[in-house]
Structures are given as C-alpha cells and as structure tokens.
Image (tube, grey):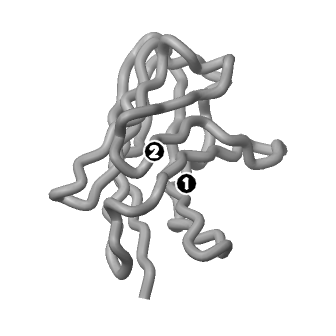
Amino acid sequence: QVQLVESGGGLVQPGGSLRLSCAASGFTFSNYAMSWYRQGPGKERELVATITATGSSTSSADSMQGRFTVSRDNVRNTVYLQMNSLKPEDTAVYFCNSIIYGRYYWGKGTLVTVSS
C-alpha cells in the first residue's frame, strides 16, 4: 500500500525558511521520480518541483527557482523541499506526489502559512 506522509509545515514570517519532508512507503522509492505540489487558498493545485528517481536532476516552477530546492534520500525513502525567502503568496497546503504505473498517489498535505 503506497503511503506518502508530509511533515514540516507551520507558520513562518516572510523571508523565513522551512524544510518539508515526505516519508514514502509501500513501493520501491528509489525507482520513481517524486514531486511537490501546492494548493493555495482559492487556487488550483500547482506543481512546485520534481526530482528524478536517482536525484540526479531536479526542476522547479519559475516562481520558485532560486528559493525552493527539492532533494531526496533513497536510504530513508524521504523527499524534502527546502523553502527559503518565503513570501505570503507561498501560503498553501503542500503535497507530496508520485506516479506509479500511471496512477497518481498523494499525501494528505502539510500546511505552510507565511505571515507576520
């Protein structure tokens, strides 16, 4: 049974940093790319960043490049999202995602609130 469990969200001031984690189980983690998505209040879910199965390549949305970094630990079966220079518009629920045999799997999300 595939499980993705996000953690690390919380309240942070503008300009601050957070590191999100997503613990994966129920599949061979090191075989699959992983992604982070987010959904802000009243907004559609959007792709934040993706990392390949080996971690050799990453990509991120234009608005987050230079601020957000995705990484993974294939021993701990965990993917991370380091978020720096946070802005109020980064407020959202952040979801971990993987596509396994064409099926999308999601975690329940972790809430990030950027506010003074």
Please give left or right for residue 72 compared with residue 85 in the image.
Answer: left
Q: Please provide percent x and percent y for residue 5.
A: 39, 66
Total labels: the figure holds 2
Mark 1: give few (<14), some (14-19) or many (20+) Cα within 10 Å. many
Q: Please provide percent x and percent y for residue 23.
A: 31, 62
Query: Residue 71 is drawn in which quadrant?
Result: top left
Q: Quadrant of the N terminus?
A: bottom left
Q: Which residue is mark 2?
A: 52
Q: Farthest residue to the left: give it.
A: 75
Residue 63 to residue 44: above or below: above
Q: Earlier in the sequence, mark 2 or mark 1?
A: 2
Q: Please provide percent x and percent y for residue 66.
A: 49, 11
Mark 2: give few (<14), some (14-19) or many (20+) Cα within 10 Å. some
Residue 63 to residue 52: above or below: above
Which mark lies nearer to you, 2 or 1? 2
Residue at the spot x=73%, y=42% of the render?
A: 46
Q: Which residue is mark 1?
A: 95
